[in-house]
Amino acid sequence: MFPFVRLFKDLFLASRQPPLETLTETHVSHHICWPHDLDVWLELNNGRALSLYDLGRTAMAQRAGMIGVLKREGWGLTMAGTSTRFRRRIRGFERFEMRSRALCWDDKFIYLEQSMWKRNGECASHVLYRSAVTNKNGIVAPHTVLSAMGQPTTSPEMPDWVAKWCAAETHRPWPPMQDA
């Protein structure tokens, strides 16, 4: 089940923080790995990690003013792709910090970066998301979204590693091949 109670808690805490001036500023949130977050190896389940990343993105979007714009315009927010690296275990009851920010955007997508950091300063995981704002007609261009938010519409330069990921995604077959 999606962690709705945690989401409401994180949105409440984010509402008490100063607004982010730009979508590219980093939102920092703090979390605990609870027993219901664990897999059979007693570490943070990889699927639950992605759900927890949802919390960080949503609070970041709220602080940047995006949630209000989405509600006002009747737009939705969806994830169109992801690349995740897991490098260190997060164990039960362990506290960790999550960092969330937008890196850049193109004509269709906003690219988001998030990471989980252990108390000893080690990065436990890192994720890159390709997100899209949508309406009944399809994708809303990021410059339209940022303009509605009152933010600069010119994207920071796309990092090379993000550009290479985007290029690799163009070679991935869709729909995927199905074995008979």
Image (cartoon, grey):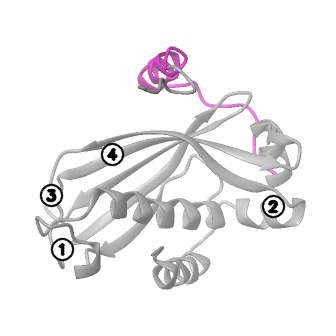
Asked if the residue at tag 1 contacts the one at tag 3, i.e. Cβ–Cβ closer than 8 Å, the answer is: no
Q: Secondary structure at mark 2?
A: helix
Residue pictured at 16% horizontal, 75% vertical: 92
Residue 72 screen position, x and y as percent = 87, 65
Q: Whole-Å distance between the Cαs marked 4 and 3? A: 12 Å
Whether residue 49 is situated above or below residue 85 in the rendered picture: below
Whether residue 147 is situated above or below residue 168 in the rendered picture: below
Residue under label 4: 126
Asked if the residue at tag 3 contacts the one at tag 4, i.e. Cβ–Cβ closer than 8 Å, the answer is: no
Residues packed near mark 4 inside 10 Å, few (<14), some (14 to 19) or many (20 plus): some
Q: Secondary structure at mark 1?
A: loop
Residue 67 screen position, x and y as percent = 72, 65
Residue 44 screen position, x and y as percent = 23, 65
Instruction: Look at label 3 and name its amino acid.
Output: Arg
Q: Is residue 165 left or right of residue 65?
A: left
Residue under label 1: 94
Whether residue 31 is situated above or below residue 49 in the rendered picture: below
Q: Whole-Å distance between the Cαs marked 4 and 2? A: 27 Å
Q: Is residue 72 left or right of residue 133?
A: right
Q: Which range of residues does the magenta coloring cover? A: 150-172
Residue pictured at 66% horizontal, 60% vertical: 64
Residue 166 screen position, x and y as percent = 52, 22
Residue under label 2: 69
Of the pair 8 and 160, the residue shown nearer to us: 8
Instruction: Look at label 1 and name its amino acid.
Output: Glu
Q: Whole-Å distance between the Cαs marked 1 and 2? A: 35 Å
Give the quarter of the figure containing the C terminus. top left
Given the current orientation, which residue lies at the most extreme front position? Answer: 180
Of the pair 44 and 124, the residue shown nearer to us: 44
Residue pictured at 55% horizontal, 25% vertical: 158
Asked if the residue at tag 4 contacts the one at tag 1, i.e. Cβ–Cβ closer than 8 Å, the answer is: no
